[in-house]
Image (cartoon, grey):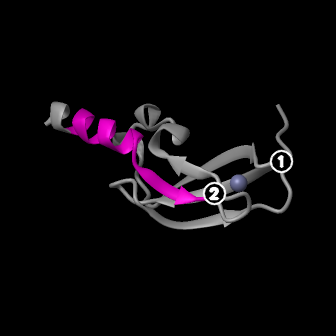
Amino acid sequence: MAECKSVTRKYLIKKLLTTCPICEKNIYGKDIDIFNINTEKINQWPLRYIHCHSHNDIPLHALTLYLDADFSVRAREVSDYIMIQQ
Ligand SMILES: [Zn+2]
């Protein structure tokens, strides 16, 4: 079972999940660091994943992906403003 899961994730690494509606960046499984998502600790689906990137000369922006348990993108949302404070 565990092995089956890792095979699925290897496949997901190369899978095109979605395209950013702002900059048209293709977002693959590897872009959301899929190996570091522990699905057993997630108790509410869809998973909300924020992917910040700049691409095609478009400044940094945040794309929220809503992911189902099989890592298919159910919905996506772009933030107009972001500030990350540490
Ligand atoms: Zn983008």
**Pointer 2: residues within 10 angstroms few (<14), some, or many (20+)?**
some
- Looking at the rendered structure, the secondary structure element under dot 1 is loop
Are the residues at dot 1 and dot 2 in contact (C-beta closer than 8 Å)? no
Q: Residue at x 73, y 52 (%)?
A: 62
The x and y percentages for residue 18 are 52, 59
Question: What's the residue at 59%, 65% (across, down)?
Answer: 76
Left/right of residue 14 with respect to residue 58 in the rendered view: left
Q: Position of residue 14 (x, y in %)?
A: 40, 42
x then y, percent, for residue 3: 17, 31
Query: Foreground residue, 20 or 78?
Result: 20
Quarter of the rendering occupied by the C terminus: top right
Work out whether 14 lies above or below 26. Answer: above
Q: Is residue 20 left or right of residue 80?
A: left
Distance Cα–Cα, label 1 vs label 2: 20 Å
For the residue labelled by badge 2, is the local secondary structure a helix, a strand or a loop? strand
Please, is residue 26 above or below residue 6 in the view? below
Magenta stretch secondary structure, dominant:
helix
Which amino acid type corresponds to the residue marked 1 in the rendered image? Asp
* Tag 1 residue: 57
Q: Which residue is mark 2?
A: 64
- The residue range painted magenta reads 5-19
Q: What is the residue that sits farthest to the left in this orientation?
A: 1
37 is higher (above) or lower (below) than 26: above
Question: Which residue is located at x 82 percent, y 40 percent?
Answer: 84
Look at the image and say whether residue 41 sits in the magenta stretch: no
* Dot 2 amino acid type: Thr
